[in-house]
Amino acid sequence: MKIVDLRSDTVTKPTLEMRQAMYQAEVGDDVYGEDPTVQKLEELGAGIMGKESALFVASGTMGNQIALMAHTNKGDEVICEADSHIFYYEVAGIACLAGAQARPISGQRGILSSDRIKHHIRPQDVHQPRTGLICLENTHNRAGGTCYSVQELAQIKELADSNHIPVHMDGARIFNAATAQNVSVEKLAEKATSITFCLSKGLCAPVGSLLTGSHDFIQECRRYRKMLGGGMRQAGIIAAAGIVGLETMVERLQDDHLHARILAEALVSIGMDIDMETVQTNIVIANVSSFGITAKQAAALLGEQGIKAAVFGEYSIRFVTHHGIEKDDINYTAGIIAKLVKEINAGLL
């Protein structure tokens, strides 16, 4: 049976070039600051983002939580989008690790406007927490891979600066956002005080993320990484794959976006409910309620045919395109779904 895994771009496998680089990587003890490959990765990532320094971390969640700990004081409040990864998927780390309070607010397709944020910045009041940080997710996972534009980010930065509030960007898929808008990733990153981005999603590295910001900020974050048990030793073995990802895997992201658009259009043509305004990058979220089944049931039916998709709510199912998924896989997937829809409508399933 043909298997097409569209659950997430985290299922990507390292390329042959990555495996060779990992095998040949020069290593040292990174906790002592002696791993040259980690240093090269951090310098490369910081330079691409236009930041002074970077820190190699085990995951995007670790990078986000370290940034929260470094930016805020206990009792602060963190503004974030209501369905953002940092609020929805990071196990209450805002409260548990940073000792801060989340202020989740709903955006338009996951995107927060400066006007929306402005009304949730706390006034100076002894009875209220201090707004200590604004968090943005670019692209926004649960909204379907939607992007902040340079203009939207500039407006938020102006608001944040005027209120002396730092901005942290969860840029897990920031290269997808830049590719979709045909802008440099630095143009998006420069609007944030700090930014985390993943090496292990569209860039295909097997593990790891980078947290970038000012030199002093990253020095503080290094302490928090150690506190969380994230100080790795001969980490150059995995950092080597991240270097290859940054150098060779960015331009091909446009293929993933094209495949997502082809899939979304095919699914809409057979009656599936998809907000096409959200199909901006490599994520497609479809609602299956009109077929009288739940997302869990839909995923099970697809799984029986070798198509893997993620349950994303009671009636929502998510497909994510990535390296290793070709146009033939997309056409095959659309054909299988069309067949299942026909059988459902005929009362055969």
Image (cartoon, rainbow, N blue to C red):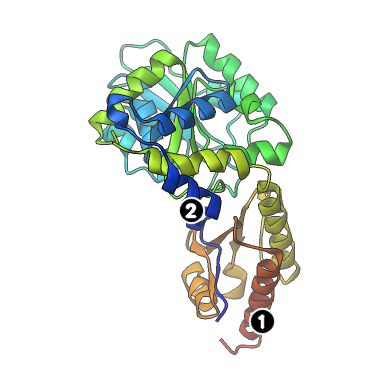
Circle 1: element type: helix
Numbered disc total: 2
Q: Residue at x 72, y 65 (%)?
A: 268
Q: Position of residue 309 (x, y in %)?
A: 52, 65
User: Callout 1: 10 Å neighbours few (<14), some, many (20+)?
Assistant: few
Q: Answer left or right for 212 relative to 72.
A: right
Q: Answer left or right for 78 relative to 18.
A: left
In-front residue for pair 231/162:
231
Q: Are marks 2 and 1 in contact (CB under 8 Å)?
A: no
Identify the residue position indicated by label 2 in the image.
10
> Would you identify the image quadrant in which residue 38 lies?
top left
> Would you identify the image quadrant in which residue 71 lies?
top left
In-front residue for pair 14/153:
14
Identify the residue position indicated by label 1 in the image.
339
Q: Residue at x 67, y 27 (%)?
A: 150
Q: Answer left or right for 287 relative to 225.
A: right
> Would you identify the image quadrant in which residue 124 lies?
top left
In-front residue for pair 267/29:
29
Circle 2: element type: helix
User: Callout 2: 10 Å neighbours few (<14), some, many (20+)?
Assistant: some
What is the CA distance from the residue labelled 2 to the residue labelled 1? 28 Å
Q: Which mark sits nearer the N-terminus, 2 or 1?
A: 2
Q: Position of residue 118 (x, y in %)?
A: 54, 20
In-front residue for pair 346/142:
142
Specify the amino acid type for callout 1: Lys
Q: Position of residue 167 (x, y in %)?
A: 49, 22
Q: Residue at x 31, y 27 (%)?
A: 100
Specify the amino acid type for callout 2: Thr
Q: Is residue 330 visible?
A: yes
